[in-house]
Amino acid sequence: DTAVSQTPKYLVTQMGNDKSIKCEQNLGHDTMYWYKQDSKKFLKIMFSYNNKELIINETVPNRFSPKSPDKAHLNLHINSLELGDSAVYFCASSPRGTDGYTFGSGTRLTVV
Amino acid sequence: GEDVEQSLFLSVREGDSSVINCTYTDSSSTYLYWYKQEPGAGLQLLTYIFSNMDMKQDQRLTVLLNKKDKHLSLRIADTQTGDSAIYFCAESPPGAGSYQLTFGKGTKLSVIP
């Protein structure tokens, strides 16, 4: 039973398209996150939501918009995709703060 | 990643010990973590150490923390081929940033049979 699940696992799309990545956690955690891992494996936080409320919004283009319909879900919508958006996007959740982070297996986005 | 530094590559022979080093800059970090990422997979928490500890041992893993030098290391005893992965050091700043982990760029460990 997957704790943090992301869909899709792979996403190949053309420049200019709009796409969404979904994330769901069944751990009952209050906080969910989106991280981006670039081609050099560098991981950087993008967004964090606590009980559906945005608490971290790092400097990312406003083409990226997170949406949390409930505390078990945090989706990432990306408008007008660019080549530089190609990366692996990881969803994660934690019960409180950084203790007990659980990561999803990632979504590999390729923009062509 | 600019606040947490790691060497990018490490190669060891099977059965030897591996030592992966990390330096961090935020001396007020409460927890320091080691994560493992196998190819095509997400990050798996290996171990963590609280900032008031010097050492933590968990089976084949030993974490050493030198707060004065802001240096963290992960020692893997009797390294196996299954240990081949990328290892990330991460720090947890206090305050509002406590929800955020700052990762190093990762050390790719290659185990030679």
Image: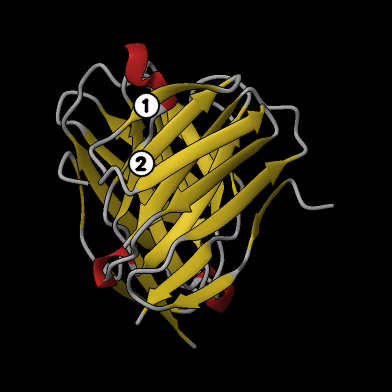
Whether labels 2 and 1 share one chain: yes
Q: Position of residue A11 (x, y in %)?
A: 52, 73
Q: Is residue A52 above or below residue B4?
A: above
Q: Residue at x 33, y 69 (%)?
A: A16
Pointer 2 with pointer 1, Cβ within 8 A? yes
Count the labels in the image.
2
Q: Secondary structure at mark 1?
A: strand
Q: Is residue B56 left or right of residue B65?
A: right
Q: Secondary structure at mark 2?
A: strand
Q: Position of residue A20 (x, y in %)?
A: 53, 56
Q: Provide the residue designation for mark 2.
A: A45
Q: Position of residue A34 (x, y in %)?
A: 46, 44
Q: Provide the residue designation for mark 1.
A: A56
Q: Is residue A4 above or below residue A94?
A: below
What amino acid is at disc 1?
Ile
Which quadrant of the view contains residue A37?
bottom left
Of all residues, the one furthest to the top in this rendering is B95
Q: Is residue B44 left or right of residue B66?
A: right
Q: Residue at x 20, y 25 (%)?
A: B26
Q: Is residue A101 left or right of residue B21?
A: right
Of all residues, the one furthest to the bottom in this rendering is B113
What amino acid is at disc 2?
Ile
Mark sitting earlier along the chain (2/1): 2
What's the chain of the residue with tag 2?
A
In depth, the one of A32 and B55 nearer the eye is A32
Q: Residue at x 54, y 78 (%)?
A: B81
Q: Position of residue A5 (x, y in %)?
A: 69, 53
Q: Is residue A54 left or right of residue A9?
A: left
What's the chain of the residue with tag 1?
A
Q: Residue at x 67, y 27 (%)?
A: A71
Q: Is residue B37 above or below residue B74?
A: below
